Image: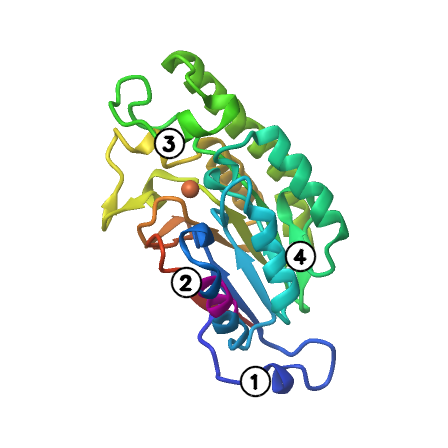
């Protein structure tokens, strides 16, 4: 259950044990650090480290294929708190899904305090919060995938998606969504067995009602590229099987902020973002 912060410091919250009663998580998404110059990146990391949090949760779109690892290294080398992350579609731009995944996995295996949730089992933070996640992918299932005139840069800048005819493209997006849901489903169940408070990270909104774009829900022309129906389905299934567990889903991708109650025990928060102006979305306290 999310609670308002009580202003206690990390040291105070840690009194009496390795973790205090409140776990404070800083949420970031769509920071697109490649839009900043090197001084801007350093300044952003310095700002982050001024926050009193137990961990950072990062919902993807960190950089592009050639910069995502250097930026992740910045988190590793600059911040005191550990970072749990997923990747977004931009993190594969000017590269391939396969190669970026191989490279990030190899780097993350040696990292001291960064965890790529897509390749990791549920992670306990503090006594009572468990975090799981998956990159997810806009899977083209909701809205007007075959007829929309809107095209994303994904379809030109990511090797596996480049220049595919529309039907083949949608089929590939379906597959990427299904793969994500298949990775996430067992971890959701495991997390719900471990804790009554589960935080789920995904890059893409998993529900139509969470696909906020310019202060409204995405139209049917944007929705296929702004939602991952397959991931939403496994979240609802798990939440239905574990009504006593509270699921907080954090996502981004659309750059429009909003909240959506997908079920009595599933709250979805979508991040706002602006290129060149990375920001802390929220600091969430769990008690
Ligand atoms: Fe994105």
Dot label at residue 153: 3
Residue ID for mark 1? 9
Residue ID for mark 2? 281
Report helix, strand or loop for mark 3: loop
Left or right side of 107 for 175 = left
Q: Residue at x 63, y 31 (%)?
A: 99
Left or right side of 280 for 58 = right
Report helix, strand or loop for mark 4: strand
Q: Residue at x 51, y 29 (%)?
A: 177
Left or right side of 40 for 49 = right
Residues at marks 3 and 4, CA–CA distance in whole angstroms? 28 Å
Looking at marks 4 and 2 on the same chain, the residue that comes earlier in the sequence is marked by 4
Q: Which sits in the foreground, 257 or 239?
A: 257
Circle 2 Cα neighbour tier, 10 Å, few/some/many (<14 / 14–19 / ≥20): some
Residue 266 visible here = no
Residue 52 coordinates in the image, percent (x, y): 54, 77
- Queried whether the magenta region covers residue 59, the answer comes back as no
Q: Is residue 139 above or below residue 267?
A: above
Viewer-nearest of discs 3 and 4: 3
Report helix, strand or loop for mark 2: loop
Viewer-nearest of discs 2 and 3: 3
Looking at marks 3 and 4 on the same chain, the residue that comes earlier in the sequence is marked by 4
For the residues labelled 4 and 1, say whether their Cβ atoms are less than 8 Å apart.
no
Residue 35 coordinates in the image, percent (x, y): 40, 52
Looking at marks 4 and 1 on the same chain, the residue that comes earlier in the sequence is marked by 1
Residue 28 coordinates in the image, percent (x, y): 47, 59
């Amino acid at each position: 259950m999310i609670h308002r912060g009580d202003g206690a410091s990390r040291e105070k919250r840690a009194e009496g044990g390795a973790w205090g009663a409140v776990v404070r998580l800083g949420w970031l998404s769509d920071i697109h650090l490649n839009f900043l110059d090197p001084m801007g990146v350093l300044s952003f990391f310095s700002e982050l480290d001024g926050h009193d949090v137990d961990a950072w949760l990062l919902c993807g779109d960190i950089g592009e294929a050639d910069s995502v690892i250097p930026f992740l290294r910045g988190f590793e080398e600059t911040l005191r708190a550990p970072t749990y992350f997923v990747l977004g579609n931009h993190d594969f731009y000017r590269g391939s899904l396969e190669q970026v995944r191989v490279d990030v996995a190899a780097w993350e295996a040696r990292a001291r305090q960064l965890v790529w949730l897509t390749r990791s089992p549920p992670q306990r933070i503090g006594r009572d919060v468990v975090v799981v996640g998956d990159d997810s992918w806009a899977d083209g299932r909701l809205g007007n995938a075959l007829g929309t005139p809107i095209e994303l840069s994904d379809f030109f800048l990511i090797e596996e998606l480049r220049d595919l005819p529309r039907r083949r493209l949608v089929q590939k997006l379906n597959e990427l969504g299904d793969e994500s849901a298949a990775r996430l489903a067992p971890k959701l169940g495991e997390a719900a067995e471990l804790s009554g408070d589960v935080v789920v990270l995904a890059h893409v909104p998993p529900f139509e009602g969470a696909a906020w774009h310019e202060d409204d829900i995405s139209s049917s022309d944007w929705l296929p590229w702004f939602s991952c129906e397959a991931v939403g389905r496994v979240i609802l299934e798990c939440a239905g099987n574990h009504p006593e567990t509270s699921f907080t889903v954090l996502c981004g991708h659309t750059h429009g902020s909003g909240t959506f109650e997908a079920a009595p025990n599933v709250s979805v928060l979508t991040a706002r973002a602006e290129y060149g102006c990375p920001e802390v979305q929220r600091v969430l306290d769990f008690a």
